[in-house]
Every structure is written in C-alpha cells, then in structure tokens.
Image: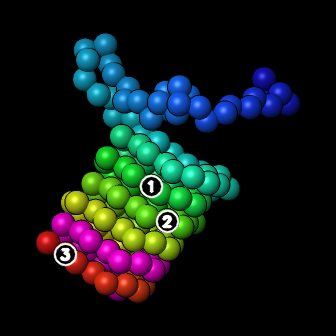
C-alpha cells in the first residue's frame, strides 16, 4: 500500500472512467464532486460532469458541466467553459460561464470573459473584455 507507486496512463478507457457520472442504486446521479488538491499539476485537457474543486494547477482546456470552484491557490492557464464558476485563484485565458460567475476579492483573471450573470467582490482583478447577459 505505502511505498508502492501505481502508474496510470491516460488512455481512452481510463479517461472515460475518471469522468463518468456516479449512479446510485436508484439510478439517479449522486452528489459526487471532483477535487484537485494543492500541489497537483494537470497538463492537457480536463473535463468533468460534476462539481469540481480546484486548489492545484491546470495547464490546458477546462470544461466543467457543473460548478467550477477555484480556491485561492488554484491556477489555470488555458480556456475554461463551465456552467457556474466561483473564482478565488488565478486564471490566464478566456472564460465562458453559461450561468453565474462569482469573482472573490482574491480572484485574478487575465482574458476575455463571457457570463450569463456575474458578481465581483471589491479587490478582484479582471483584465480583458467582458460580456454579461
């Protein structure tokens, strides 16, 4: 268990398993979420059907069919598409949110933003074109 390393290659079969929706015995979706902890670096495209909490770093395209929550230590370098997003970390790239985009006072966004609705706390930094509505 401890001390043994497990290597997992990102093949189509393992990629689909890591992003599949969990189903309960009644057939409905569970309230599962994806968590990417501080110190984790993902290079490449990332996709999640569930709510996603990011405290690490992603370099690449991010697509989340639910809510994306970026903590204060989170960093994304790339394009982001999400249903809803709460950002407290740093994003370098374009951002498209079909629902509500919330930028906290520690958010740093450099790129074009398109959102259905948007709320911005005092202290947030946003550099780029913004389209809301």
Please give the residue where the numbered disc 2 appears in the rendered image.
Answer: 78
Residue contact at pointers 1 and 2, CB within 8 angstroms = yes
Instruction: Give the SS element for disc 3.
Output: strand
Labels 3 and 2: the sequence-earlier one? 2
Measured as percent of width and height from the top left, residue 6 is found at 75, 29
Q: Name the residue under label 1.
A: 62
Q: Single out the residue that lies furthest toward the front.
A: 12
Give the alpha-carbon distance from disc 1 to disc 2, as whole Å: 7 Å
Q: Is-magenta flag for residue 130?
A: no
The residue that mark 3 highlights is 132
Q: In which quarter of the image is the C terminus?
A: bottom left
Viewer-nearest residue: 16 or 53 = 16
Magenta region, mostly helix, strand or loop?
A: strand
Q: Distance between the residues labelled 1 and 3?
A: 20 Å
Q: What stretch is highlighted in magenta?
A: 105-122
The picture quadrant where one finds residue 94 is bottom left
**Mark 2 Cα shell of 10 Å, populated few (<14), some (14-19), many (≥20):** some
């Amino acid at each position: 268990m401890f001390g043994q390393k497990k290597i997992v290659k990102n093949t189509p079969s393992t990629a689909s398993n890591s992003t599949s929706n969990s189903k309960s015995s009644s057939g409905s979706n569970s309230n599962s979420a994806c968590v990417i902890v501080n110190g984790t670096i993902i290079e490449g495209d990332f996709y999640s059907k569930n709510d996603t909490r990011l405290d690490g770093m992603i370099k690449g395209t991010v697509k989340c069919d639910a809510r994306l929550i970026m903590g204060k230590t989170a960093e994304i370098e790339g394009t982001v598409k999400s249903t809803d997003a709460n950002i407290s970390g740093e994003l370098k790239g374009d951002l498209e949110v079909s629902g509500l985009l919330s930028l906290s006072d520690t958010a740093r966004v450099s790129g074009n933003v398109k959102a259905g609705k948007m709320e911005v706390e005092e202290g947030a930094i946003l550099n780029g074109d913004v389209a809301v509505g």
